Amino acid sequence: MTSVSMRVNGADVRADVEDRTLLVHFLREHLRLTGTHVGCDTSQCGACTIHLNGEAVKSCTMFAAQADGDEIVTIEGVGEPGRLHSMQAAFQQHHALQCGFCTPGMIMAGIDILRRHKSPDEETIREELEGNLCRCTGYVNIVKAIKAAAES
Amino acid sequence: MYPASFTYVRPADLAAAEAAFREADDPRYLAGGMTLIPTMKQRLAAPSTLIDIARVPGLSFIRREKDTLVIGACTRHATVAAAPEVRAAIPALAALAGGIGDPAVRNRGTIGGSLANNDPAADYPSAVLGLGAVIRTTRRTIAADAFFTGMFSTALEPGEIITEVAFPGPRRAGYAKVRNPASGYAMAGVFVAETGKDVRVAVTGAGACVFRAAEMEQALARSFTPDALADVRVAAADLNADIHGSAAYRAQLVRVMAARAAAAALSGA
């Protein structure tokens, strides 16, 4: 067992976990933040994307222990009903989701894209979404939403 | 999926990391973990101890030493890709780093981890071999030509840690690859460099281990143009053959990627 402390969505958390506990399981099962999804579980699909110290990472491919001392933001931390993040609002407005499973990861990736690109063109957005898969193949509206969020 | 049990340790410095390595039964160093963790989740690796060196001070930096660019072992791909020093000195290296995996992977994966792992389809080994870089470790310096010894194997001794990589600035260099559309890994990736002394061509993804292609080096030394490679036949005998492509197909990819890399080098991209 190992003791981990981190700041998650602005709140300090501390827990004793097995050393092999993946960060995504820590978020979902210990903190009950189930907005972060486990999709492929092989670091391909990006459904588990969160922000670690302000940067997008795949929480299925790191251990909770590695995040000890870090600052984490999950989909639950970016906005709330009635006060959506501009990326969430853009996804809603442009119907950038079908089944919704990939959506939390897409939104976290989208926010990260806009952190690095002020006004990305469609090609850049598509390239940047390399690590986020939508099995409904709803990319057209996802790309549209990210572009709209950049312009908003 | 989660891996077999292990003990996680985060040493304060390199000496403590090497000490932890000596004391454990079956230790592995952990940096970005972008290959090791998926491998552990599939239970293809089950180390007793993970020694996390990602935050050991002094391993994440980029600096110029005259005409040489030195990159710390725990520098992440995203950092290398975005660094003005890299983009100015060796733009092909910045472009290569910016094409590894995907953005989230580039935010975790490190140059030292990629080199120590020596995946046959990893990008960085081709840049290190193609540029004739030098790998500095906790114990010695190793020339690129002596570092990559086979599939997933290197000249590193047990417990030895890469601390930095020194890239001599080339006159020009370029990298081109064809990604496997499913995995994203290079089916064939070729790094071409005109160093001032000679021309080096390093191929990744196509064989069991990154290798230099002598015939293409000679052709480009005669004339550093994509056309110089038109008549070079790449031997398919030792190349990979699998469901994604035959050895002959990969040989063709290698030649085409080399020509594209040369074109990229000439355009300064």
Image (cartoon, coloured by chain):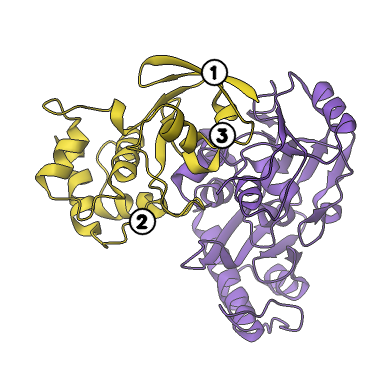
Which residue occupies the foreground of this view, B181 or B23?
B23
Residue shown at 75%/72% (left/top)? B218
**Residue B215 pos. (x, y %):** 75, 76
The residue wearing badge 2 is A133
Amino acid carrying mark 3 in the image: Glu
Specify the quadrant that holds the C terminus of chain A: top left
Amino acid carrying mark 2 in the image: Leu
In the figure, the yellow chain has which letter?
A
Q: Is residue B115 left or right of residue A55?
A: right
The residue wearing badge 3 is B85
The residue wearing badge 1 is A69
User: Which is more foreground, mark 3 or mark 2?
Assistant: 2
Specify the quadrant that holds the N terminus of chain A: top right
Graded by Cα atoms within 10 Å as few (under 14), some (14 to 19) or many (20 or more), the crowding at tag 2 reads many
Which residue occupies the foreground of this view, B214 or A133?
A133
SS state under label 2: loop
Amino acid carrying mark 1 in the image: Gly
**Residue B206 pos. (x, y %):** 66, 71
Give how far apart the Cα atoms at labels 1 and 3 are. Answer: 30 Å
Up the image or down, A127 lies above or below A32; here it is below
Q: Chain of mark 3?
A: B
Up the image or down, B48 lies above or below A76; here it is below
Q: Chain of mark 1?
A: A
Give how far apart the Cα atoms at labels 3 and 2 are. Answer: 33 Å
